[in-house]
Image (spheres, coloured by chain):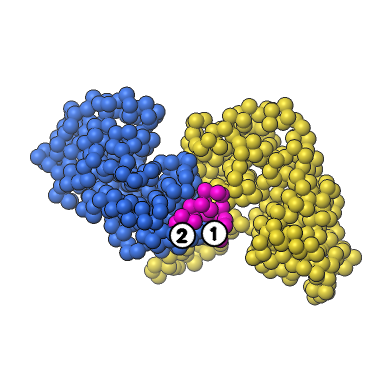
Chain colours: A blue, B yellow
Amino acid sequence: MKIVVDGMGGDHAPHEIVKGCLEAVKEYGIRITLTGDSTKLEQELKNLNAPLESFEIIHTSEVITMDDPPVKAIKRKTDSSMVKGLEMIRGNFSSVLISAGNTGALLAGGLLKVGRIKGIDRPALTSLLPFRKSNTLLLDMGANTECKPENLAQFAMMGSVYMESVVGKKNPTVGLLNIGTEETKGSELYKAAYQIMKGMQHINFVGNVEARDVPEGVVDILVCDGFTGNIVLKYTEGLAYSLFGMLKDVMMKNTVSKVAALILKPSLREFKNGMDYTEVGGAPLLGINGGVIKAHGSSNAAAMKNAIRQGMLYLENGVLERIQNAVTATVEDKL
Amino acid sequence: MKIVVDGMGGDHAPHEIVKGCLEAVKEYGIRITLTGDSTKLEQELKNLNAPLESFEIIHTSEVITMDDPPVKAIKRKTDSSMVKGLEMIRGNFSSVLISAGNTGALLAGGLLKVGRIKGIDRPALTSLLPFRKSNTLLLDMGANTECKPENLAQFAMMGSVYMESVVGKKNPTVGLLNIGTEETKGSELYKAAYQIMKGMQHINFVGNVEARDVPEGVVDILVCDGFTGNIVLKYTEGLAYSLFGMLKDVMMKNTVSKVAALILKPSLREFKNGMDYTEVGGAPLLGINGGVIKAHGSSNAAAMKNAIRQGMLYLENGVLERIQNAVTATVEDKL
């Protein structure tokens, strides 16, 4: 098992990244390979009194920034921490890269530097949304702005593999995000995807799901195109934040409500954390020929540790082999 | 000014519909035309001691139910309260129909029975979302699952007219819902729409808006295709409901938090009402040759009264003429 971490990716790199790695090393007894500026990374490790024998540093001279144009960055910054990380995990089913860097670049790099699993047309970026009663795996959340029906069907298959093998949900239910529950609802893309998914033997397809029912956790896996998924994901974040602000306004209205709010403070903090949809570990990029976990750009040490843990589970449960096997199986489903 | 109300449309028809009409009659001193089963409607009016001289009843023998297939219902149930209502307002710019009935049927009926304003390719269903700092008009929220770039540009124009003339917002800002703020972001549809909207002289286009920023009310008008808009609208409803449930869970955890929750009850009710995105009057169907306001299917009397008020403002401010004029003006914008 090889855990590679992009030491220079993310808003708080390298400090919080290295700190998160150290926490993961201590808690899980693993060894981590860090890519990035060796002087900076070594200094961070030294400052944290990290056990140096648990770290391998691969020096790189370039950094892909959050504002770099994705494809150009991957093609030109060949000695960047992200590109080197991607090259290290390419084709190796027992290695995983965790990066909090530029999402677009990581997606482009996944395709250009690592490549797709044979039989997968389009990789998908996924996210586990923690709803009130249960979690829902959303995919694609932004890797593909334009999709074909066959892509959505493959997302359903890959999501099922991930949800079953990493999250441990047996026979997970798959829903298609749509504007109505009837199978004739939605755009041509969604109508066609429904027909393919209905015929797939290896997934537990339960039909269309209306957006209104999504937060109740009615399905384990929610499939949509990357444009819609990205909007749902970011809207969740924005709306949760805004509603918490509205709640605060209401509570700060008068002295009595302020006192009550003070009493509720610990519970409300818990509520707020429950609404923090962005920090639930990382988002795996499914369908490429190596393990890649995208951690949130604003990841702190705790978020990085969680993303690393997710990468470990990814490898321990053989997600890549399972997707490869599932592709073979779904050939029967005429995908 | 002619106010027509579909007396049989909605989950709580005819009772709550008639009750809402009576409240509107009393409050605004208007006269209302009700379409539907005259026996039932007269009985409701009698039970409510309504001033019969303020009502005109147009008897119809059929009802389009919530489950009826839209186009078929409009074509076959020609003596229904909805179809008769639509026929009454067709081409008459000083009349408006308010209906809480089957949304799909009302959209189909708007096109088939009323027709489009000359120069408008696709009508749009709109909704005013009440966010924390200000309101945002969302369109299209579901009339068009497939759109062309030109449609989105026309939505921007119609939304601007509505926001300025009915809501009273001077020079309202228009944003395009997208997965990034740069003009090269999004699907081909959104990239092309951006280019058209950028060149339009008669709207205040401010560029792409990410879903994360939408609940902060960063624009007055948010334009998107009907598939995406419908998902955003219903997701807002579902997520607000779910977050309120999570908040309740947190507050009911122990005795102390229960006491504090009790103190906050009035403020929390206000918060919950603020989150009730579905009951903010009705949703105007813009771009057809007559005024049509869609009230929520579960409308009670208060919601109906609000929707009727909205219809009045629609007429008083000459929205239909203004859209017609704006179409002419935007010919210069090469739409």
Q: Which SS class for mark 1?
A: loop
- Give percent across and percent down for residue B31: 85, 59
Label 2 environment density (alpha carbons within 10 Å; few <14, some 14–19, many ≥20): some
Badge 1 is on which residue? A183
For the C terminus of chain B, the quadrant is top right
The subunit carrying tag 1 is A
Q: Earlier in the sequence, mark 1 or mark 2?
A: 1
The answer to which quarter of the image holds residue B219 is top right
Tell me whether circle 1 and circle 2 mark residues in contact (CB < 8 Å).
Answer: yes
Q: Amino acid at mark 2?
A: Lys
Residue with the most extreme left position: A53
Q: Is residue A287 left or right of residue B95?
A: left
The subunit carrying tag 2 is A
- Give percent across and percent down for residue B332: 72, 26
Q: Which SS class for mark 2?
A: helix
Q: Which residues are magenta?
A: A178-197
- Give percent across and percent down for residue A329: 32, 56
Q: Which mark is on residue B246?
A: none
Q: Is residue B244 left or right of residue B18?
A: left
The residue drawn where x is 72% and y is 31% is B330
Q: Nearer the viewer, residue A252 or B299?
A: B299
Q: Is residue A21 left or right of residue A335?
A: left
For residue B3, say whether it is visible.
Answer: no
Q: Nearer the viewer, residue A46 or A294?
A: A294
Q: Amino acid at mark 1?
A: Glu
Is residue A285 inside the magenta stretch?
A: no
Is residue A184 inside the magenta stretch?
A: yes
Badge 2 is on which residue? A198
- Give percent across and percent down for residue A234: 46, 45
Label 1 environment density (alpha carbons within 10 Å; few <14, some 14–19, many ≥20): some
For residue B34, say whether it is visible.
Answer: yes
